[in-house]
Image (cartoon, grey):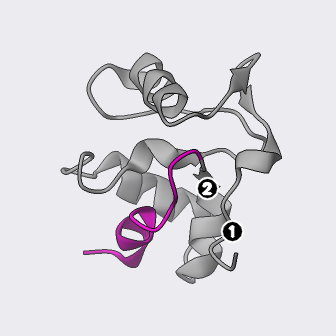
Amino acid sequence: MHESLLLLKKIPRGKVTTYGILAGMTNSSPRAVGRIMACNKEPEKYPCYKVVLSSGEVGNYSGKGGRRSKIKLLEKDGVIIKNGKINRGYFWFFNQ
């Protein structure tokens, strides 16, 4: 199990993180983290929908329903998305 998947469980409800933040926490690269998220076989256990682009854009989702499903899951968590972007106030940095 890659450490970046384990970190997903620490993100509180209503918060998101970025591929870059996870990469920094795991001494990896954002692209590598993206591949790990895309290969996540247990999205219910490891909520990869909480990982977004550093620009705040929602990005892709390999789970059932794709990007639309990711947006619905984020909104269900209480994350507000405006014009396809998430305000940095929702970002989780793990050192909080």
In the displayed structure, 83 sits above or below 53; it is: above
Q: Is residue 11 above or below residue 63?
A: below
In this figure, what is the number of numbered marks? 2
Q: Residues within 10 Å of mark 1 (few under 14, many from 20)?
A: some
Residue 86 screen position, x and y as percent: 73, 34
**Which residue is at 66% across, 61% downward?**
92
Q: Is residue 53 left or right of residue 63?
A: right
Kindly tell me whether residue 54 is visible in this rendering.
Answer: no
Instruction: Using the image, tell me which numbered label, if any, was put on residue 93.
Output: 1
Residue 23, compared with residue 39, is above or below; it is below
Which residue type does callout 1 highlight? Answer: Phe
Camera-side residue of 5 and 44 = 44
Q: Residues within 10 Å of mark 2 (few under 14, many from 20)?
A: many
Classify the position of the N terminus by image quarter.
Answer: bottom left
17 left or right of 44?
A: right
Is residue 39 visible to us here?
yes
What is the number of the mark on residue 17? Answer: 2
Horizontal and vertical percent for residue 7? 44, 71
Between 45 and 66, which is closer to the camera in this rendering? Answer: 45
In the rendered structure, which segment of residues is drawn in magenta? Answer: 1-14
Q: Magenta stretch: residue 4 in it?
A: yes
- The amino acid marked with disc number 2 is Thr
